[in-house]
Amino acid sequence: MTGLGTALVGLGAILALAAIFGQLLREAIAPDGSHPLIETMNARIAAWWAFAVLMALALLAGKAGVIGLFLLVSFSALREFLTLTTKSLADHWTLAASFFFVLPLQYLFLAAEWQSLMALFVPVHVFLLLPVISALQGRPEQFLARVAETQWAVMICIYCVSHVPALLWLPIPGFEGRNLLLIAFLVLVVQTSDIAQFAISRGIGQRLIAPSLSASKTWEGTVGGIAVAVLAGGALSWLTPFSPLQAMGMSLTLALMGFFGDLVMTAIKRDKGVRDWGHLIAPHGGFLDRLDSVIFAAPIFYHLTRVFWANP
C-alpha cells in the first residue's frame, strides 16, 4: 500500500473509532440527543468525516484537487466573515480584490510551492494594498474600521486557511507520501482540546476566563483540556515525524493557539452581536464556527514543522 493509502486508512480507522465511541455514549447516556456535550462531540466527528471524505476525493485529483478544495473553503469562510464587517459602497473594489485577486494568488503561490511568497504576500503586500484601494475611493467615513476588518478577514480566511493544505508539500525526510497525516494530527489535537475544554468546564469549571465573552470557558476547563490534548498528541505521535515528546510539545502549542483562536473569534462575534458566523453546517453554524481553532493553529504548526523537520 502506498504512503497515501496508509494515511487514508489510518485516518479512516481513527474516525471510525471516534464515531463508534460517540454513538455508544449517546445510546448509554442520552438516546434522545439531549446531552449537549455528546451532541457537540458527535457533530464535530461528523464534520471530521465530511472533511476526510472531501480530502480523499481531492487527493485523488492530485494537487489541483487539494488546491481547489481549500480555495473553496477560503472563499466560503471569507464570505461568512465579510458578511459581518463594516462596509460602504466605496469598498466595492477592495472586496472584489480580496475575492478575485488575493484569494487566487495565495493559492497560486501554494500550488507553485513558492513558500516565501505564500508566507509574505498577505501579511505584507496585501496589508499595504487594500488600504490604498479603499483610499482611492475618497470616502473617509469609518475608514480605519472598514479597512482593518477586511484585512482581518483576509488574514484569517485566506492566509491562515491556506497553511492547512501547505502541510501536504513539506519535504520531510523519511515522511514522504504521508503528509496527509500531519493535517489529521493538527485537526485531531485541536478538536480534542476543544471538546475536553468544553467537557471539563461544564463538569468542574468555576472560574470564568472572560465572562463577557463566554459563559463556558473556565480556567479549569482550559488547563484540563490542553493537558488532555497534550497527552492525546503524544499518543498520536505515530501519525507524525515527531517523537512522542516532540509531539506533546507541538500539541501544547496547537492547543494554546486553538484556544486563542476560539477566544478571538468569539470576541468578534460578540462585537457584531451574532451567535454564529453562518448557517452552512446547520445547526452548528458556518465554516468559521467549526474551524476557528484549527485556523489559528495551522500557520504556527506549518512554520514550526517547516523550520525543524523539513528540508531547507
Image (cartoon, helix red, strand yellow):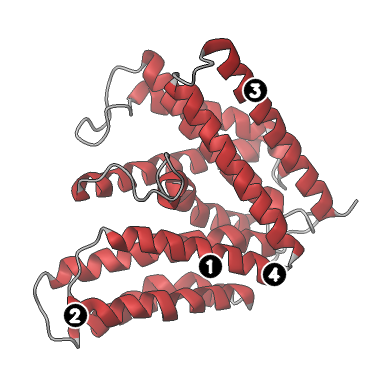
Q: Earlier in the sequence, mark 1 or mark 4?
A: 4
Q: Earlier in the sequence, mark 4 or mark 3?
A: 3
Q: Nearer the viewer, mark 4 or mark 2?
A: 2
**Regarding mark 2 in the picture, which secondary structure is present there?**
helix
Specify whether 59 is left or right of 149. right
Q: How many marks?
A: 4
3D distance between C-alphas at marks 4 and 2: 37 Å
Residue 230 visible, this orientation:
yes
3D distance between C-alphas at marks 4 and 3: 33 Å
Tell me if mark 1 has few (under 14), some (14-19) or many (20+) residues whose alpha carbon lies within 10 angstroms of its own. Answer: many
**Regarding mark 1 in the picture, which secondary structure is present there?**
helix
3D distance between C-alphas at marks 3 and 1: 33 Å
Residue 21's tag is 3
Direction right: furthest residue? 1
**Amino acid bearing label 3:** Phe
Residue 66: % across, % down: 65, 64
State the residue at coordinates (74%, 40%).
12
Residue 176: % across, % down: 79, 58
Residue 71's tag is 1
State the residue at coordinates (71%, 54%).
56
Residue 254 vs residue 14, the one in the foreground: 14
Q: Earlier in the sequence, mark 2 or mark 1?
A: 1
**Residue 256 versus residue 203 in the image, above or below:** below
**Regarding mark 3 in the picture, which secondary structure is present there?**
helix
